Amino acid sequence: MSESSALPPVFALVDANNFYASCETVFNPKLRGRPVIVLSNNDGCAIARSAEAKALGIKMGDPYFKIEKEFRKAGGVALSSNFALYADMSNRVMSLLSEFSARQEVYSIDECFLGMEGHRELTSIGLAIRSRILTATGLPVCVGFAPTKTLSKLANHVAKKQPDWNGVCDLTALSASDQDALVGGLDVAEVWGVGRRLASALHDMRITTVRQLRDANPKQIRSRFSVVLERTVLELRGISCLALEEVVPPRQQIVVSRSFGAPVYDLPDLEQAVGTFAARAAEKLRGQSLAAGAVRVFIHTSPFRTQEPQYGKSVTLPFHAACDDTLRITGASLAGLKHIYQPGYAFSKAGVMLDALIARDKVPVDLFEMVDGSKSQELMRVLDSVNSKFGKGSIATGAACGAPGAWTMRQSNKSPAYTTQWDELPKAR
DNA sequence: GTCTACATCTGTC
DNA sequence: CTAACGGACAGATGTAGAC
């Protein structure tokens, strides 16, 4: 690990509050102060909740059909997800944050690490970050500072939970005894990398607080669990093991999958869905200048309909030479689908995954030319530019064509793409 | 028997 | 009207066939 500076590492973790719900509220201020949730694709589950919605007891991942009645009675607003809007807002936030440090790792759509070595008055920097993001985008964020990534995540959690910290928590400014008291009151499940299963296993060993995990024997943790959790213990002690990853590692996999709006039984319907997913996956692939060495298709029934017969299968089809051609990827996907399809089941989901990715320009030219031909390259270029100019699906393969079937997703209450689609803006009057 | 590639499962945001 | 429970990834674990 080579830090550019000789200074001890300091990380900021900036995380937007209730990101998707906040994005919606920015563009529709009438939502302010109301319980707002954003639903997953298919309007399936709650994936973001405003503070008011959390106060109503809505949990992350709650299936909407189970809470809808009560939620609406309480005056709640449920919105279909609008990822084009969230991605655009995310880009704005990340770009603003780069003003505060040249060393930035975009960790997820609403989270970002910053390298803050050599900066003093961290709390006031945190407050400045908050006000900059709020003024420029309308989005509330919280900021945590600490000598390790794991601790900065924890600091961010504290900043979010404790109103009197004003959305900023600088662990580097706390005395050892104050830190002890703080982490002694935090559930071990709040630690980055400790999920449900690990939390319950730790619980069985009488490790229930962050402080107890921090003070556990690292070697014992390593042998009982993994080197990953051992690293977490060290990070909790302030020993930085995880460096800022400023360069995004190349994708290993591209996935396009959807749950269906209604159960699908027949092969032709599945073919239309898989054809659509394959085309989208190939588009993503070219967008990142990659080529795929293999394509994988999967279909399965709904694990929630336990009374119905269950079936799920996936298959991988390697390409002779890596390719990025929509027609070939679609062809392979459909061949795979035929291979795994079984009649008589109510399928709930399908997907196409591209594996063994390599940079497009690393594919040996003769192989690329032999298998794909330059005609294919030209065709893909035209395909992408037409679809980008005239909208997704303006040109589609035969496999992805036709009237939308039962598989297309439900989105009953989607907000306009305010920032990316002129024609979706409300008319001025 | 072991090795390996593929399939499936788990966890994270 | 009824029925209705995410998606995109990485990495671990399981398993079947090759040798």
Image (cartoon, coloured by chain):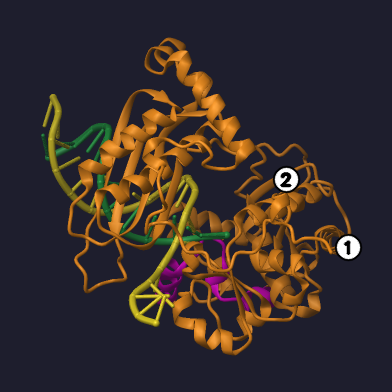
Chain colours: A orange, B green, C yellow
- Residue at 58 percent of width and 57 percent of height: A234
The residue carrying mark 2 is A104
Which residue is nearer to you in this view: A412 or A242? A412
Do the numbered discs 1 and 2 sit on residues whose CB atoms are within 8 Å? no
Q: Position of residue A173 (x, y in %)?
A: 81, 65
Write down the chain letter for disc 2: A
- Residue at 18 percent of width and 54 percent of height: A343
Which residue is nearer to you in this view: A2 or A288? A288
- The answer to whether residue A139 is seen in the rendering is yes
The N terminus of chain A lies in which quarter of the figure?
A: top right
Which comes sooner in the sequence, label 1 or label 2? 2
Numbered label attached to residue A204: none
- Residue at 74 percent of width and 69 percent of height: A28
Residue A9 versus residue B12 in the image, above or below: above
Query: Which three-letter amino acid code belongs to the residue tagged 1?
Result: Ser
Element at label 1: helix
The residue carrying mark 1 is A124
Which residue is nearer to you in this view: A237 or A341? A341
Q: Position of residue A188 (x, y in %)?
A: 54, 72
- The answer to whether residue A116 is seen in the rendering is no
A358 sits to left or right of A96: left
Residue A253 versus residue A364 in the image, above or below: below
Magenta stretch prevailing secondary structure: helix
Write down the chain letter for disc 1: A
Query: Which three-letter amino acid code belongs to the residue tagged 2?
Result: Gln
- For the record, the magenta segment spans A180-205
Residue A84 painted magenta: no
The residue carrying pointer 1 sits among few (fewer than 14), some (14 to 19) or many (20 or more) residues within 10 Å by Cα, namely few
- Residue at 63 percent of width and 52 percent of height: A84
Q: CA distance from mark 1 to mark 2?
A: 19 Å
Element at label 2: strand
Q: Position of residue A220 (x, y in %)?
A: 43, 61
